[in-house]
Image: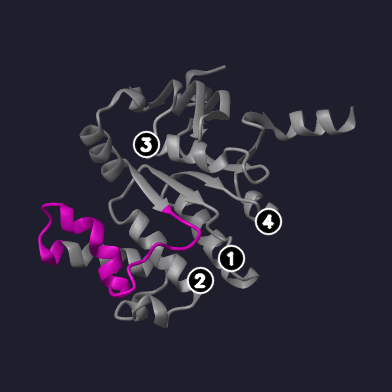
Amino acid sequence: MHAAERPAPALIRIRNLAKSYRRGGQVVPVLTDITLDVRAGDFLGLMGPSGSGKSTLLNLIAGIDKPDAGEILFDGVDITRLGERELADWRAGTVGFVFQFYNLMPVLTAYENVELPLTLTRLSRRERRAHVEAALALVGLSERMAHYPAELSGGQQQRVAIARAIISDPRLIVADEPTGDLDRHSAAEVLALMDRLNTDLGKTIVMVTHDRRAAERAHAIMYLDKGELSTAADVHERSVR
C-alpha cells in the first residue's frame, strides 16, 4: 500500500470503556469494555434498543460524562483525564450538540439562539453577526432569523439547533435522535443537512438513532445491546445461529 493510500489515524480512539450507574443501593452496568475508532470525516450511526447505552456512549464521547474505566482519546488527548474546567473549554471549542427536542431558548429568536455560544467568546458584535448569518444561511433559514421557536415548525427548530451546533466550527458533531420528533419530510431535510455538514464541511458526526432511514445516511452503523458494541455483520451472525 502506498503512503497516500493508508487510512487516516483515528480522530476518536476509545479503549476498554466501561460505565455504570447507581440505582438506590444497586450498581447497574450500562457499558462494558467498549472499544471503537472514529476517523476524521466519518459519519457513524449508533443503533440499539432503549436502555442499551447509546446516549451514555454519546455523552462520554462528547465529554459530558466520565467513564468508570477506559480511555477516550480525541486527536491524541485523553479527555477522561481533563479537569472540569479543561473539559468545558474542550467541549466549547470542539463539539457541537444536536438534541431530539432542539433545546432552544423559547424567549430568544432564532438569531439569538444561534448567537448564544458566541457570547462567551471575544468576537465583536459585528463578527458574531457575520457568523450567525452564515450559519442560518447554511441551514436555509436566513428569512426566519427574527422568529421565535414557537413560530417555527419542528424541522425549522431543529435546523436552528444545527446552526447553533456549528456556529463555533466544531470538529465533532454529536446528534442524539435528531429526527426523533420530526415528521418524515422534516426528518429528510435534517438528514440532508447532516449529509452536507459531513460531505461538504468535513464534520465528523456521531449520531444516535432508532430510525433505520436516518442510520442509513451514516458511513457505518454500530449496534449497542446490553452494554456491548457490535457491527452489522456481528448482529446478523448472531441472528442466524
Residue at image coords 62%, 71%: 183
Determine the CA span between mark 2 and mark 3.
27 Å
Answer with left or right where residue 54 lies relative to residue 127: right
Determine the CA span between mark 3 and mark 1.
27 Å
Q: Which residue is mark 1?
A: 187
Q: Which residue is mark 3?
A: 63
Determine the CA span between mark 4 and mark 2.
16 Å
Marks 2 and 4: in contact by CB < 8 Å? no
Quadrant of the rendered image containing residue 89: top left
Q: Which mark is residue 155?
A: 2
Query: Percent from the top left, x then y, of residue 189?
Result: 55, 67
- The question of residue 182 being in magenta is answered with no
Marks 2 and 1: in contact by CB < 8 Å? yes
Label 1 element class = helix
Decide: few, some or many residues near mark 3? Use Cα within 10 Å; few <14, some 14-19, many ≥20. Answer: many
Which amino acid does the dot numbered 3 rest on? Answer: Gly
Residue at image coords 62%, 30%: 227
Camera-side mark, 3 or 1: 3
Give the mark nearer the N terminus: 1 vs 2. 2
Q: Provide the residue span drawn in magenta.
A: 98-127
Decide: few, some or many residues near mark 2? Use Cα within 10 Å; few <14, some 14-19, many ≥20. Answer: many
Q: Which mark is residue 213?
A: 4
- The question of residue 121 being in magenta is answered with yes
Residue at image coords 25%, 34%: 84
